[in-house]
Amino acid sequence: MTELNAEDARRAIVEHTRRLAEAAAAAGPDAAVPTAPEWTITDLVEHVGQTQHWVAEIIERRITDPTQLPTEMAVLPTDPREWQAWLSESAQRVASACSDDALDAPVFNPAGDERPGTRFWMSSMLNEAVVHGFDAAAAAGRPADIDADVAAALISNHFAMLTAPTWRMQRPKSAHAIQGTGQTLQWLATDTTDDAGAWFVERRPDGATWQPATKQADVTVTGPAGSLLLTLTRRLPLTGREATDISVDGDTDLARHWLDNTAHVSG
């Protein structure tokens, strides 16, 4: 599975949260978030900061029992002028919690896969900062740059989540919808090296699987890793190459069905 090393992941969480905070300040607290239509910038900032503090506490306390997860959430400052400092604090806290000592320590992993809990949470927090950073940038009318290596790691995390043991319990409709009879989807990044930018998905009767590989598929979706990530998280459309640099070869309806049935729970 494509992963960033821990130091790069921690640095990216802090950097992308900083960009998110700057975009949020430019957009203003009441601005609508076009890529998350039910949210305002206030909602987005609160969600990201609270989630970072909540996860940091889980890791700091080495919580392994889901019944012991924190029940109180950090409070968003009432003055929007304090939000950048608040987000900087939450990002630094969760990055520090994901220390080298914590990486393989016993910590609850909601996905139930083979990853130690801290490594799961570190990928999740990076995903939050990057994808919601794009949301904030869209609200502010700003471009949002995503490094290809960061995007590739998050795409791998995305597929790991969708095929994790607990996905069927958490999202039974999604898990059922992405079962199949052998349909295959290939996702290819144009700006990464080797198989770091190749994800092959097969829809099997017992559930979907994925592997980092390049194979013949019923549909192949190709583009920069950042565009693929934003398409997979339904921030960019599948079609419309002039806007996304994404090309689709094969059964477009198969790719669209996948996207329509694989939204994550939050934002």
Image (cartoon, rainbow, N blue to C red):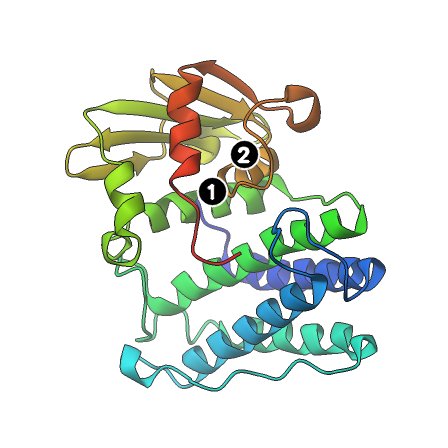
**In terms of secondary structure, where does tag 2 sit?**
helix
Residue 77's image quarter? bottom right
**Disc 2 marks which residue?**
228
199 and 67: which is toward the camera: 67
Is residue 194 placed above or below 217 in the rendered structure? below
Is residue 158 placed above or below 77 in the rendered structure? above
Residue 246: x percent and y percent? 58, 24
Instruction: Residue 93: give its label.
Output: none
Q: Which residue is found at the position 68% from the left and 73% from the top? A: 87
Asked whether disc 1 touches disc 2, contact meaning CB atoms under 8 Å apart, the reply is: yes
Q: Quadrant of the N terminus?
A: top left
Name the kind of residue labelled 1 in the image: Ile
Residue 41: x percent and y percent? 71, 62
Q: Which residue is found at the position 63% from the left and 59% from the top? A: 39
Is residue 78 placed above or below 196 in the rendered structure? below
Name the kind of residue labelled 2 in the image: Leu
Residue 258's image quarter? top left
How many numbered circles are shown? 2
Viewed as shown, does residue 66 lie left or right of 3?
Answer: left
Query: How would you rate the neighbour count of disc 2 (Cα within 10 Å): few for under 14, some for 14-19, many for 20 or more?
Result: many
**Disc 1 marks which residue?**
155
**In terms of secondary structure, where does tag 1 sit?**
helix
61 and 139: which is toward the camera: 139
Q: Is residue 57 visible?
A: yes
Query: How would you rate the neighbour count of disc 1 (Cα within 10 Å): few for under 14, some for 14-19, many for 20 or more?
Result: many
Residue 29: x percent and y percent? 77, 66
Q: Which residue is found at the position 48% from the left and 23% from the top? A: 221
Q: Which residue is found at the position 47% from the left and 13% from the top? A: 249
Viewed as shown, does residue 31 lie left or right of 95?
Answer: right
Viewed as shown, does residue 236 lie left or right of 221?
Answer: right
- Of labels 1 and 2, earlier in sequence is 1
